[in-house]
Image (tube, rainbow, N blue to C red):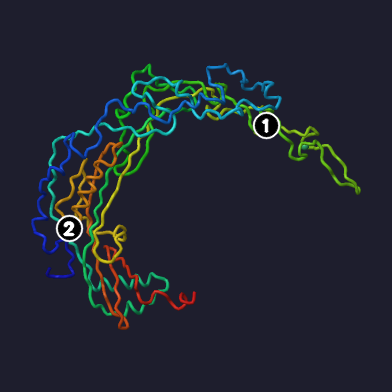
Amino acid sequence: MADPRMVGVQVQGQPQQQYGGYPQPSPQQSYGQQGQPGYPPQGQPGYPPQGQPGYPPQAQQGGYPAPGGTPPQVGFAPGQPPPEGYQQGGAPPAAAGPEPSAPSVDKMDSISGYEGVGFGSAPPLPPPSYEEAQRQPPERSSLPQLPGITEEDAREALGQYVAEQCCYGKSPAQELKFTDIVPSSAFHYTLETFAEGRSTAWAYEPFKGQPIDGPMNGPAPGPWDIQAQAPAMFQNFTQQVEVPHTASVKPCHTCLGLGRKPCHHCHATGTSHCHHCHGSGRTTVYEDGHHHHRCCTWCHGSGRRQCHQCHGLGQIPCPTCGAQGQLKCYIKLTIKWINHVEDHIVERTALPDELIRGVSGQVAFKEEYPRVWPINHFPEAEINNASQNLVQRHSTAYPTERLIMQRHQVRIIPVAEATYNWKDQPYNFFVYGFEHKVHAPDYPQKCCWGCNIL
Ligand SMILES: [Zn+2]
Ligand SMILES: [Zn+2]
Ligand SMILES: [Zn+2]
């Protein structure tokens, strides 16, 4: 190379034609035809998975009686005083066992295509198959040249860097004598795969008379038939959608349809212990050299006060159904757009590789396609290999997601390693990135006098 300060992408010994056209990918590299290795999952019919684990009908076991079984004799109408069972201060029925955390799956309507769906978190659903039309790899143009880092740049960058460190001595940066500046280039390859995962689960919300789109309106669409557009490409996002034609109204599993539940604070009695007299109904005052008992003015001697949680009613509005007594149950589709990012850095000096990620450089190459072809035209074989490996990996790494779009790029980041003498000792430092960031771990005056004492 004529000018050693010009940091180009042309590496000596590499044939010129490497920059130009884009050879056809070899058969192992090619993608696209259905059934070829490397392309995910291929449309198993009949999702969702049958018999998913994790949906035991817990709601039917023990504890609160299941709705529909025994009539809810324990209930009491809103506004009415609690029935006797509660007044006695005995444990309310809810104390006999844990409340069901969700309605019983058995009570849900049977929705064709959604058999086996439960409440709570759900496993991802296998995506439909990816069918790609015959396609041609793109034309790829030659790669750009990159300006290098000069001695002047290096000195200025070091001076700036030293000025920003609170106690670095300035004299080495001003007095140093450069012995060499070796320019090179780091390469940063990034592959992004933007994909979409879907899962379904039963969900519920208070029924307040909102429209119910139930099975009477037609068969429910399959989870992957529901149209949804990612709000932005290559960004993570989660969206939840009600699956059409799956809704119905059910009695609330928490309050058995009553809209209210016993107050736990007062055990449904409506009164609680008076904290001022500790339930004794009287307080002690010291007067005229003697202790006197007085009637507690807070509870008027009863030792009990109105429960502040339920205002004396012994019952509270049911939080599950918002005191409505009824729930709208429906199948909820959760759509997760995920951007999978992986990269590879080629940097051959002693500069720590990860520093390359944080600085800007020249984007030498960028492509975006539903499925990208691995790079094979870059003059740095390690980048081609990294691209080959990562593209191959991403093609099978996310079998439960539908791949929407991929993009990859190579950035070229200038790096210069400067060596210099100061007080007859050799040192070196690195300048990298368009910002001319400095990495100088052995800078000779890193601590001022004050630092050394501390
Ligand atoms: Zn309820
Ligand atoms: Zn209460
Ligand atoms: Zn009291």
Observer-side mark, 2 or 1, equals: 2
Residue annotated with mark 2: 380
Residue annotated with mark 1: 266
Q: Position of residue 398 (x, y in %)?
A: 29, 40
What amino acid is found at the position of numbered circle 1 in the picture? Cys
For marks 2 and 1, give the CA distance.
75 Å
Q: Position of residue 195 (x, y in %)?
A: 29, 40
Label 2 CB-ligand 1 distance < 8 A: no
Instruction: Name above or below for residue 15 compared with residue 178.
Output: above
Left or right of residue 338: residue 410: left
* Res. 322 mark: none
The foreground one among 121 and 414 is 121
Label 1 CB-ligand 2 distance < 8 A: yes
What amino acid is found at the position of numbered circle 2 in the picture? Glu
Image quarter of the N terminus: bottom left
Instruction: Name above or below for residue 209 compared with residue 449.
Output: above
Name the residue: 31% across, 72% down.
Answer: 158
The foreground one among 60 and 307 is 60
10 Å crowding of disc 1: few (<14), some (14-19), many (20+) = many
Helix, strand or loop under label 1 = loop
Helix, strand or loop under label 2 = loop
Name the residue: 34% across, 78% down.
Answer: 172
